[in-house]
Image: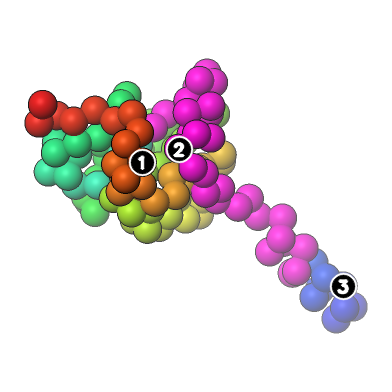
Amino acid sequence: MKKLIILLFINSIFSQQQILDIDYKKMSKILDRDSTVLIDVRTVDEFNSFRIKNSINIDYYSKGFLDSISSFKDKKNIILYCRSGRRSYYAAKLLQQKGFNNIYNLEGGVLEVKKKNLDFKSLNN
């Protein structure tokens, strides 16, 4: 019986959906699919300085983060990004705990996008 309980516990750990870290190229392919939303979890000031095209801003540190993002729970794919990928990873973990599925984290965040001169929209231009 003890072995069965341990086996069930280990199985439950490994059966949990993992947060997928993706690069910019893979993100672009996922964005081409229906029912995908791109969410910038940085602060409003960071978002207003520059952002990836077609993203929406929901500040991870805001009190209403979960309420604001809950309207996207039915989306097939949710891609999160931030400055470096760390904040969006923690946001993804929180969403996973709240029952969200198909959550992606952009590796390296906007720093990686800017470093590679990839397609992003600057609001300062």
Residue 98 visible in the shown view: no
Magenta range: 9-38
**Does residue 70 show up magenta in the picture?**
no
Q: Is residue 18 left or right of residue 125?
A: right
SS class, disc 3: helix
Q: Which residue is mark 1?
A: 116
**Does residue 10 show up magenta in the picture?**
yes
**Precedes in sequence: disc 3 or disc 2:** 3
| Mark sitting on residue 4 | 3
Residue type of the residue flagged with mark 1: Lys
- Towards the viewer: 103 or 107: 107
- The image position of residue 93, as x and y in percent, is 47, 55
Q: Is residue 60 above or below residue 32?
A: below
The N terminus lies in quadrant: bottom right
Which one is in front in this view, the residue at disc 1 or the one at disc 3? Answer: 1
Residue at position x 72%, y 55% from top? 15
Q: Is residue 31 above or below residue 103?
A: above
How many numbered tags mark residues here?
3
**Is the C-beta separation of discs 2 and 1 under 8 Å?**
yes
Residue type of the residue flagged with mark 3: Leu
Label 1 to label 3, Cα distance in Å? 50 Å
- Towards the viewer: 68 or 14: 14
Residue at position x 60%, y 52% from top? 18
SS class, disc 1: loop
Q: Is residue 46 left or right of residue 24?
A: left
Residue at position x 25%, y 47% from top? 42
Label 2 to label 1, Cα distance in Å? 10 Å
SS class, disc 2: helix
| Mark sitting on residue 24 | 2
